[in-house]
Image (cartoon, grey):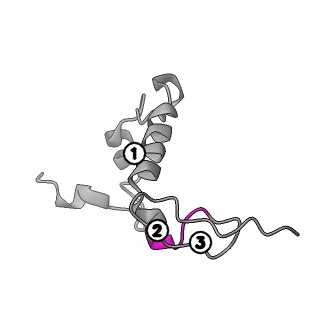
Amino acid sequence: MVDCGRRTCARAGCAREVKKPTNKYCSRACCALDPERKERLREAGRRHVLPMSRQLSLEFRGWDEGVFVAGCADLEEAPQGLSRLAVV
């Protein structure tokens, strides 16, 4: 194996050498501080936005709490939820 020499850290302003030939940064802290890396990650996150048609819908159609409460009125173990706090 041919030694290509030691590489320096990729973060601007850091002149330390990397510890392994496959590393890009000298430490995890240096990696976390790299502003160029943070910007690349930000841009990647902006590119992969889900379209509205693929996002989760939280609508409850045709569901009436009154029907559920009326059906459970006679059961002892029926969940009370927040209805027990409602003013009657």
Residue 85: which numbered mark, if any?
A: none
Residues in magenta? 24-29
Name the N-terminal-most of marks 2 and 1. Answer: 2
Q: Would residue 87 be found to the left or right of residue 49 on screen?
A: left
Cα separation between marks 1 and 3: 64 Å
Mark 1 touching mark 3, by CB under 8 A? no
Q: Residue at x 12, y 51 (%)?
A: 88
Q: Residue 85 in the image: state x and y as whole percent.
A: 17, 60
Q: Residue at x 51, y 23 (%)?
A: 53
Q: What type is the residue that disc 1 sits on?
A: Phe
- Residue under numbered circle 1: 68
Mark 3 touching mark 2, by CB under 8 A? no
- Residue under numbered circle 3: 18
- The question of residue 84 being in magenta is answered with no
Q: Would residue 62 be found to the left or right of residue 19 on screen?
A: left
Residue 15: which numbered mark, if any?
A: 2
Q: Is mark 1 on a helix, strand or loop?
A: helix
